[in-house]
Image (cartoon, rainbow, N blue to C red):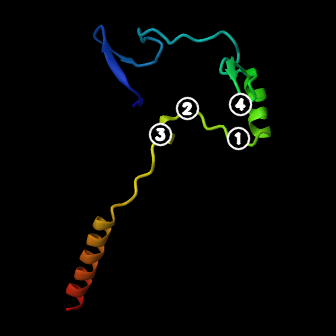
Amino acid sequence: MTRGTFVYRGGQLVEKGGPDDIRPLPPRSDLPCPMLISDIMDPAEHVDGRFYTSKSGFRKVTKANGYIEVGNDPARLNRPTKPNPKSREKAIDQAIDKAFARAS
């Protein structure tokens, strides 16, 4: 028995992604290696006041000035929450009570 995902199309069992699948294929490039990441970027102003269109040039100036490139993740702006000391004291008290109950 062949393993895979099958669907009924026109009363026949057809393998999804197989030669008889009627779903359109995603667009693909004719290039032999289409997944290249370019060094070119939109012009971005750096701390030195100059505009850079090269990612490697931008990173080189960043490193030379002693900065760290962090990206645009909004989670980096969230401050870490401090644990509530009251809940910690309560947990400690419960652990002590539990230990005394076991010893008794």
Side of 43 where 57 appears, left or right: right
Query: In the rendered structure, which disc, 4 or 3, sits on the residue that comes first in sequence?
Result: 4
SS for dot 3:
helix
Query: In the rendered structure, which disc, 2 or 1, sits on the residue that comes first in sequence?
Result: 1
Vertical arrangement, residue 28 with respect to residue 91, above or below: above
Residue shown at 44%/51% (left/top)?
80
Q: Measured from the top left, where is residue 31 in percent x and y?
A: 69, 12
Residue placed under numbered mark 4 in the picture: 47
Side of 70 where 90 appears, left or right: left
Vertical arrangement, residue 25 with respect to residue 55, above or below: above
Residue placed under numbered mark 3 in the picture: 75
User: Disc 1 to disc 4, how far (Cα)?
Assistant: 10 Å
Residue placed under numbered mark 2 in the picture: 72
User: Disc 3 to disc 2, how far (Cα)?
Assistant: 9 Å
Residue 67, label in figure: 1
Locate residue 21: give its quadrant: top left
User: Disc 4 to disc 3, how far (Cα)?
Assistant: 23 Å
Locate residue 1: give its quadrant: top left
Q: Measured from the top left, where is residue 68 in percent x and y?
A: 68, 41
Residue nearest the observer in this picture, 11 or 100? 100
Name the kind of residue labelled 1 in the image: Tyr
